[in-house]
Amino acid sequence: MIPAGDGRLRTALHSGRFAVTAEIGPPRGADAEAIAAKAELLRDWVDAANITDNQGSHTRLASWAGSILALRSGVEPVMQLTTRDRNRIALQSDLISAGAVGIPNVMMLSGDHPTFGDHPDAMPVFDLDSVQLIWTARLMRDQGRLLSGKPVKPAPHWLIGAVENPFAPPLRFRAQRMGKKVAAGAEFIQTQFVFDLDTFGRWMGEVTDLGLEQRCGVIAGVGPIRTVRAMEFMQSKVPGIHIPDHVVRRLRGVPSDQVAAQGMALCVETIETLRETAGVAGVHVMAFGHEQVVPELLERAGIPPRTATAPTVTGRTHDAG
């Protein structure tokens, strides 16, 4: 159960209101206005926005800097922190710093290997794995201690997040893997893109059987496919994405100038189904480089602006995430 506290995302998960998060990809340049422009599009529609951490192992503005810029623009950030680029000293330092500047949410993940990015010869670090980093963050926040045992005074008070992929093999262990992250301290989980609702539904059934949704908000990843080429890239280049045959046929079955509209319609239908899926606490909308479609997408799915009264999570009457 997520305790009450400051922060729009924490409040949504605590109250049972259907949460909405999105992503802001930092620019490949010293351009503060790029963050501000994307924040302007999302401000009224999301509880928080992930500021990605050198996504795809491509060098960009740092997540902590983008998080500060998002705060200035009125959007609550989720600062991503990958273990790929930092050892435990740097990771703990960044977590302390996030608390000091008022970043309310942090997300722990391993990150894509450097071989996939723009510096394929870079040395990966991976001093800790994502579960160990989640545990480290909880140790710092709840016990006020570093891994070295030295005190952290005052301790930071961010909400701790993680990621999970319900579609990566072996499927039968995915819910248990999420359980490890929840046991380590994760309070919300964002998933990989959900296109395969049947597999996702089975995974959510296992999650609820384990009672994990009572302790951690499950925020399902969604996003519109804009072109057939984009779909093919996701299938071949992005690990863990499964696009079912019926979705492929649907997008291939319309003229090229109608694929984007069909992709939007498909995403709207997915959100509507997820809102009715027991245990799902919200959606994480990924529209990298096309943030302008997020308000329309949410409005069509029946999710009001955050300034209005938002729907509660189906099937839940308790204060949990």
Image: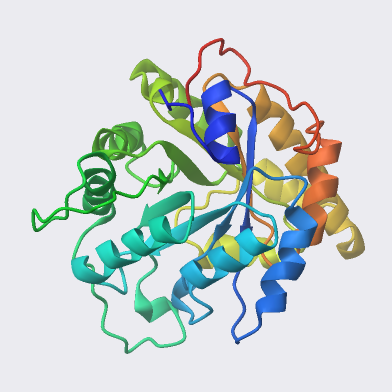
Judge by depth and name the residue closer to the eye, 150 or 122. Answer: 150
Judge by depth and name the residue closer to the eye, 148 or 248. Answer: 148
Specify the farthest residue to the left: 149
Task: Identify the residue at horizontal 36%, vertical 78% (top origin).
Answer: 114
Quarter of the N terminus within the rendering: top left
Estimate the x, y position of residue 4 in percent, counting from the top left. Answer: 48, 27
Judge by depth and name the residue closer to the eye, 277 or 59. Answer: 59
Estimate the x, y position of residue 19 in percent, counting from the top left. Answer: 62, 34
Estimate the x, y position of residue 202 in percent, counting from the top left. Answer: 47, 26
Task: Identify the residue at horizontal 45%, vertical 60% (top origin).
Answer: 80
Please tell me in which quadrant of the rendered image residue 291 appears. Answer: bottom right
Please tell me in which quadrant of the rendered image residue 138 appears. Answer: top left
Task: Identify the residue at horizontal 36%, vertical 18% (top origin).
Answer: 211
Q: In this rendering, is residue 91 above or below 273?
A: below
Q: Is residue 55 visible?
A: no
Specify the farthest residue to the front: 154
Estimate the x, y position of residue 266 in percent, counting from the top left. Answer: 77, 42
Q: In this rendering, is residue 131 above or below 183?
A: below
How was the colour assigned to the protein in this rendering?
rainbow
| Total residue callouts | 0
Left-right relation of 251 to 206: right
Left-right relation of 35 to 238: right
Q: Is residue 253 visible?
A: yes
Task: Identify the residue at horizontal 55%, vertical 18% (top origin).
Answer: 278
Q: In this rendering, is residue 200 above or below 287?
A: above
Q: In this rendering, is residue 309 above or below 209?
A: below
